[in-house]
Image: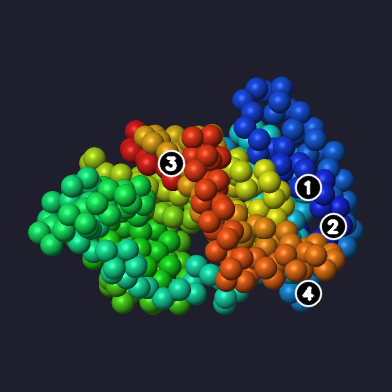
Amino acid sequence: MAVHVARTSNAVAAATAFFMLTSRVSSDRAAAAMIALAMRATAAAAAAREYNRHPMGPASGVLELEAVPCPLCGGRDVATLGWLRDVALGVPGTFPLARCRGCGLLHQNPRVREDELERAYPDNYPAHARDSEMPRMLRRDGPAVRWALATWLGYRHLATADASPGARAWARLHRRRIRENFPPWIGGGRLLDVGCATGRFLHRMRAVGWRVAGIEIDPVAAAKAAAVTPEIFVGDPIDAPFADGSFDVVTSFHVLEHLPRPLHALRRMLHWLADGGLLIVEVPNAGGAGGRLFGRYWSGLDFPRHLVHFTPATMAAMVERAGGHVAAVTHRTKPRYLTRSLRHWLRDQPGRRHRVALAALDSRVGRGAAKLALELIMPINRPLGLGEAVRYFIRRA
């Protein structure tokens, strides 16, 4: 049964509940305390009463919502933490942040109706606004990158004779960055990118020898990706026609949180892996530093487009249910993740000083200073497990 979005004025309680929920706790008693805090959030209660009293019709332009089972365990008993709005792109309405009482998964429930999801993505949605292009790393530092790939990641087919001592020194200095941008070479070099958007990643992979294919639900973005490879399926990943065992590596970067059936999609991705294959999935980390610091302004929430909000524990549980196991994880934080959240917060604050701060942050000098400061501070998030995003390296069980 469809329900409709309603407004709420008490966002502070929702932010507090989210902050507490994403703190790393392991005891049942602490989890119960957080649920109790969430249930006391007046925003949730007020919003629930409001949308039951005054539902808005489709003519209002507000996205319709529907109650759904938990995407992880299938349960229907959820605690609503608050109703939040789209602070990034301004899609009308407010949207619920809920926690499954059975498995702890954070997700949108009630969720934007599946037949309305397309309306949650305006034309200026950034993932679809980029044209596919050769990354600067390969274009500018190709010999160094090729030498690094051949030396450390198994790309034995790449020519490395043009890698000078200086290029090799550069590669050693940027070893982490190279490893983050390229998967290890596996098997026959067949790679599928799920949620390939305009094909930027596929372009990069093809340039270093992979035979590539992609899945993209947006037809406009998919048309651009088709310039990289004709093997592009347009639609939901669970409907893609690829045969089991077709790929040595399957990647999915910042896609799973957008899908209405993430468990089914994960299961399909694992089935597409050949023997010894590797699935690489990256999603925002709801337990990271940004969520704790910015609460409802955290860019990783991205309501209403993000339907599920993973922590390492809930991602591991979903991978296990899908028939895989997490072999390794890396925590990642980029300055733009945090500056995005800071912009959301500044835009919503009254007063001239916040407008001045926002203008400074958006200036060239301000952007550079913020990036430098964050690059000095952010590495501490990796060993603490507080990255803004987590990359999971997954094998079939």
Of the residues shown, which amino acid type is indicated by label 2?
Thr
How busy is the neighbourhood of tag 1: few (under 14 within 10 Å), some, or many (20 plus)? Answer: many
Q: CA distance from mark 4 to mark 1?
A: 25 Å
The disc at residue 330 is: 3
Q: Are marks 1 and 3 in contact (CB under 8 Å)?
A: no
Q: Is residue 189 above or below residue 132?
A: above
The disc at residue 203 is: none
In this view, the mark in front (4 or 3): 3
- The figure's colour scheme reads rainbow
What residue do we see at 74% from left, 33% from top?
Answer: 34
Q: Are marks 4 and 1 in contact (CB under 8 Å)?
A: no
State the SS at label 4. Answer: helix
Of the residues shown, which amino acid type is indicated by label 3?
Thr
Residue 84 image point, x, y percent: 75, 56
Residue 204 image point, x, y percent: 30, 64
Disc 1 designates what residue? 14
In this view, the mark in front (4 or 2): 2
Of the residues shown, which amino acid type is indicated by label 1?
Ala
